Image: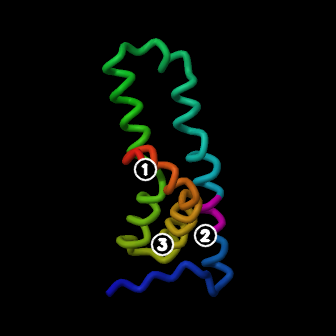
Amino acid sequence: MIEVNVIPVTFEQFVWLGIGLCFARGFGKRFDEDIKNSEWFKKLNGWKRWIVERLLDFTHHWWVGALLMLYSPYPQLYWFGVGIFLDDIPDIPRRLRKYFKL
């Protein structure tokens, strides 16, 4: 059984969790919207636009953070992953409703 700890107990863990949160907030929250609103994206033909949009919908950072938590050989990278994972948690229900029409 994998033990998952998402509450930092040392200052170093807290710092790496904060770095992960800031990274996710800075690069993840508006990344796909910025691409979809770009002139480059608007000029794509139908099937290319569809592919890019599906790739953007698929690559959300909750699972990237979870993979870092599961497989990181370094505790700093684990806590970085926790930050990335936690940042995306509020968006998961909305995405599931969109994907599965719930």
Q: Which residue is mark 1?
A: 102
Mark toward the start of the polypeptide (2 vs 3): 2
Crowd class of label 2 (few under 14; some 14 to 19; many from 20; radius 10 Å): many
Residue visible at 54% across and 66% down in the picture: 80
Q: Residues within 10 Å of mark 1 (few under 14, many from 20)?
A: few
Residue 48, placed above or below residue 91:
above
Which numbered dot is residue 78?
A: 3
The residue pinned by badge 2 equals 17
Q: Residue 50 placed where, x, y %?
A: 36, 26
* Location of residue 73 in the rendering, given as x and y in whole percent from the top left corner: 38, 74
CA–CA distance in space, label 1 to label 3: 32 Å
Task: Determine whether 85 is above or below 26 in the image.
Answer: below
Is residue 27 rendered magenta in the image? Answer: no
Q: Residue at x 43, y 50 (%)?
A: 102
**Highlighted range, magenta:** 16-21
Task: Please check the rendered image and state whether residue 18 is part of the magenta-colored stretch, yes or no.
Answer: yes
